[in-house]
Image (cartoon, grey):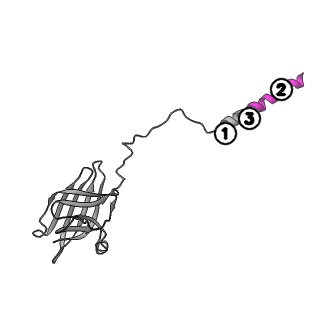
């Protein structure tokens, strides 16, 4: 009987040890679930995608059009175009947009170019200085795009305005 109690105790001890190992080898799951608020997931580190596009067919006469640099301009990789008065065209975040110009400086009278554009999702500012005064006026400057969530992108531009 003494051996039976020792054997049975050893059996229970080994059996309980294996159950603990089986339980502890499974990943523990916490009953607390954290849900991230989607409104807070947008951070200021997000950027605005500015893509090149072909010259807009809607523009028939006078216009301004810009690329990121002189090489892109010569290769017709435009990131901004307008009809010198009413409508500006850009491709932002994968969408081609036609936006209303709010204000535009007189490109022939001034040495500096200034344009303001607003749409529902973007506020755009174009600033430039005249670098050549030929048939078409060459400008170099900056393009700033701002979203309502505070995301802002500023980039250099190179291009021309003329009729």
Q: Are marks 2 and 3 in contact (CB under 8 Å)?
A: no
**Local SS, label 2:** helix
Name the quarter where the N terminus is drawn. top right
Left or right: 81, with 33 as reference point = left
Residue at the far top: name it. Answer: 1
Where residue 74 sits, quadrant-wise, is bottom left
> Is 48 located above or below residue 66 in the figure?
above
Disc 1/disc 3 C-alpha distance (Å): 10 Å
Label 3, residues with CA under 10 Å away: few <14, some 14-19, many ≥20: few
Mark 1 or mark 3, earlier in chain: 3
Residue 47, x across and y down, in percent: 35, 55
> Is 101 located above or below residue 67 in the figure?
above
> What residue is shown at x 85% (from left), y 28% (from top)?
7
> What residue is shown at x 60% (from left), y 37% (from top)?
28
Residue 162, x across and y down, in percent: 16, 71
Mark 2 or mark 3, earlier in chain: 2
Residue tagged 1: 25
């Amino acid at each position: 009987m003494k051996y039976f109690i020792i054997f049975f105790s050893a059996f229970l001890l080994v059996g309980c040890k294996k159950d603990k190992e089986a339980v502890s080898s499974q990943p523990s799951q916490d009953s607390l679930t954290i849900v991230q608020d989607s409104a807070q997931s947008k951070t200021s580190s997000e950027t605005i995608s500015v893509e090149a596009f072909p010259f807009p067919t809607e523009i028939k006469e006078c216009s301004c059009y810009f690329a990121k640099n002189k090489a892109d301009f010569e290769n017709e990789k435009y990131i901004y175009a307008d009809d010198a008065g009413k409508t500006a065209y850009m491709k932002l975040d994968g969408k081609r947009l036609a936006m209303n110009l709010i204000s535009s400086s007189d490109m022939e009278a001034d040495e500096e170019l200034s344009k303001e554009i607003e749409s529902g999702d973007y506020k755009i500012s174009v600033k430039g200085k005249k670098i050549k005064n030929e048939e078409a006026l060459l400008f170099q400057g900056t393009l700033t795009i701002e979203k309502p969530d505070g995301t802002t992108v500023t980039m250099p531009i190179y291009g021309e305005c003329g009729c």
